[in-house]
Each structure stands twice: as structure tokens, then as C-alpha cells.
Image: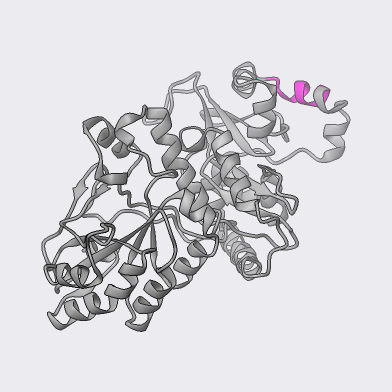
Amino acid sequence: MSATRECLRSAIAVAVFASVCLLATAESTLAASAPDALAEAYIALGGRDAIGPILGPAFRRPDDDGLYLAATGAILRVDPSGDAAPAAVSVWFSEARLDPWLESARGVPPPLPADQRLALGAVEQARDALLSQPEIRATYHASGAEMAARRWGEPLSAPRRFGPFIAQRFERGVLQLWVDEVAGAPAPGSVTAVLIGDLLVEAGLLPIAPRPTLPASVRAGDVLSQVEPVDGAVAITFDLGSVDTGLRSVLETLGERGLRATFFVTGDFTRYYEWAIPAIVAAGHEIANHTDTHPDLTRFGARRIADELDRLDATVAARGAAPPVWFRPPFGAFDARTRSLLSIRGFPLVMWRLDLGDWRDDISVQDVIAIGQRIRAGDIVVTHGGLAKTAAALPWVLDGIAERGLRQRTLSELYAP
């Protein structure tokens, strides 16, 4: 790619990014069900296993009344009526004049002009005419006509050879047939999908920060309860799965002290208390995954566990939160099988060294404060952010640890190098 073309691409991307970011703060006219429609669309397309992890919070685009959610393999859109479907994202590159970059740098054919596609006949005739490469055609139709229309949309180009592969562009993605043997590349005869979300990120056309990642000191599948103390850091973490009675007071207490924390939320809580996720995010706190419905995961198979994780990720991202990188199993229950499944999904298991006990009926506010005196440097502490008891005890707990030289942190801060 020439330096001139790279500069042009960067300038266009920055301009598009800035304009979309401005719109992202505009008042929405979407139906109240829009976030849930996005989450359901993500699950309907197969969730993380089918279209990859969610890349960032939901966003808006200029001159567009829809709300979008980006995964690596598809971009979902919900319109003002609440109807959600995959978005035809190929046009975004054309609007930003990035088709030449796609062609030269990524081996993606430019779209045929509309009149050329119309000359091929009606939609089905044009589709059949353009799907002239047998392996690409078979991959396109592998999940049936309805899923092909949702997952890929209509072909926008004919297949075209780019070095070791043949590529064809669709409304919602690109398929590549590898024909030559290249070290480190798919085997000849393989059809692979170019992940459209990754392309959009590379082009600067998604107005979202990079997807959060785990600190280098943490690996997927790790079971976490405390760290070697650094500067007296501790992480009091807040589970949210039942009521919001004390949450506003908890947020106020943290804010007054300039502190941030990690909140483990369930989907049930998120949907019932719509104000909570936007308020937590706006205050700079960290959202973590506590499943969709708070079940004992040791009782379920792999598909149900994946659904619990994916639904929560999509539910909070649709409401403006970054995709979670931390996970806490409900009831603290896990076994070797669930740990392995969570590791595959990229999650550590966040447990705790100290439980403040605020969930117990026989524990008073004074008891919670007294237990808080046992917090040590490096601890992960579990408490419950929606309880009135927690809200009443929290100022005393936070001030008490500060007097002992301890510093409240998010999990990402606790494990940062």
C-alpha cells in the first residue's frame, strides 16, 4: 500500500470515527426493547461460536436511526421499531472510499456497479450467476437460504483471484477459497471467512474502543482470589443479581471517594433495572459477567453454559458496556468441566478471599463493617451492590481500609503489571 493511500485511508477513517462518536451521545428514538433485540439477534445467529466475540458497546452511525452491535463475524442493527438483523456493512467501505484499500491491502474485490448486477437478472438470477465458484457457493448455502441471506447477504462481486486465494465479496462479508499452498495459511481447497468486524476495526469505521483484554498476569481458566500485594491494592467487587435498592448509594459512595470497582452483573438484573448499566459505565466502573440467569453452571451442558455467557455479554454491550473479560460463577460453583469450558471462552474464574456476608439475614450492618476490617492487601472481596445493608456499611468499610493504607481498585487495576 502506498503512503499516500494509507494517509487517505487514515484521514477518512478519523473523520468517520469522529462523526459517529458524536452521534453515539445523541438522544435515541429507538424502542425500549432495542437492546434486547440486539442481544437476541446475536444469540439467533449462533453467538460467539458462530459469529465471534462482541467487539465493543453498541453504537450509532451518522444519519442513521438504528443501533448497532459489532461482533467479529457480523454487525447487527436494530431499527426504531425494535426489529434486529445483520447489517449490510460492505457499503460502509464504499461510503468512506475505502474500496481501493480493501482491494490492494486485503484482497477483497470491489463491488460491481448496481447496473451490472441488475443486468444479470432478478435477485435470485443475479445471485446464481455471481456464485460461479463451486466451493464458495457451497459454503454460502451450507446453512440454508435463510441463514445465507442473514449471514452473508447478496453477492456484490464475482469471484476473483488474488495471489493464493479466490475471494468473493458479499453485503455482509467476504469468502476466500485458498488454491495455493502457503506456509501458515489455510490448506488448498479451504474456504475461509474474512471477519468483517476485524476489517471494520482496521479501517477505523467502528466508533468503539479496542475490545478489553485480560492483564498479562492473568490467563483464561485461572481461579483468582488474591494477588501478591502491590501498593496495598485490594478489589472489593460487587455482585448484582437481585435488587437495586442500595446501588445508587453504593455508586455515590464510590464516586465521592474517587474510587472505581468491578460489578458482576446478571442479565436478569440488567433487563429489570434498565438504569443500572448506563449509570455504572458512566461512573467509570468495570462490568463483569455473572451469567444471564444466575444458575449453578455445574448442572448444565456446554451449550447452555455458552448461552448464559453470550446472552450476558450481548445484553450489557447493547446497553453501552464494554464486553466483559472477567467472570464469576454463580454461588461460586464450578468443577473441572465448567472451568475448562470457561477457559475456552477466554474467562478466568474470579472467586474471593473474603466474603463480607452482606447477603446473610443474620449479618447486620455492623457485622459487615467488622468483617471489612479483615481485608488484606491483594484481596479480592465479594459483596452485593444492590443491598441496602451493603450501601449502609460501604462508607465505613472504604474509609477503614484507607486508614490502613489499602487502596480500592478494579480487577483490571489490581492485576495490572
Secondary structure, magenta segment, majority class: helix
Residue in front for this viewpoint, 48 or 102: 48
Expressed as whole percent of the image width and height from the top left, the position of residue 390 reads 31, 68
Q: Quick one: quadrant of the C terminus?
A: bottom left
Relative to 228, residue 256 above or below: below
Residue at the location (32% across, 30% down)? 299
Magenta-span inclusion, residue 129: yes
Residue at the location (24% across, 76% down)? 398
Residue in front for this viewpoint, 42 or 103: 42
Among the 4 quarters of the image, the one containing residue 203:
bottom right
Relative to 272, residue 253 above or below: below
Residue 317 seen in this snapshot: no
Expressed as whole percent of the image width and height from the top left, the position of residue 162 reads 57, 33
Q: How many marks?
A: 0
Residue 134 seen in this snapshot: yes
Among the 4 quarters of the image, the one containing residue 90:
top right
Q: Is residue 399 left or right of residue 64?
A: left
Please identify the residue farthest to the front as the structure is shown. Answer: 362
Magenta-span inclusion, residue 346: no
Residue at the location (14% across, 73% down)? 232
Expressed as whole percent of the image width and height from the top left, the position of residue 413 reads 27, 66
Relative to 100, residue 297 above or below: above
Residue in front for this viewpoint, 118 or 369: 369
Q: Is residue 368 left or right of residue 124?
A: left
The type of colouring in the image is one colour
Q: Which region of the structure is painted magenta?
A: 125-132
Expressed as whole percent of the image width and height from the top left, the position of residue 23 reads 66, 67
Q: Is residue 109 left or right of residue 130?
A: left
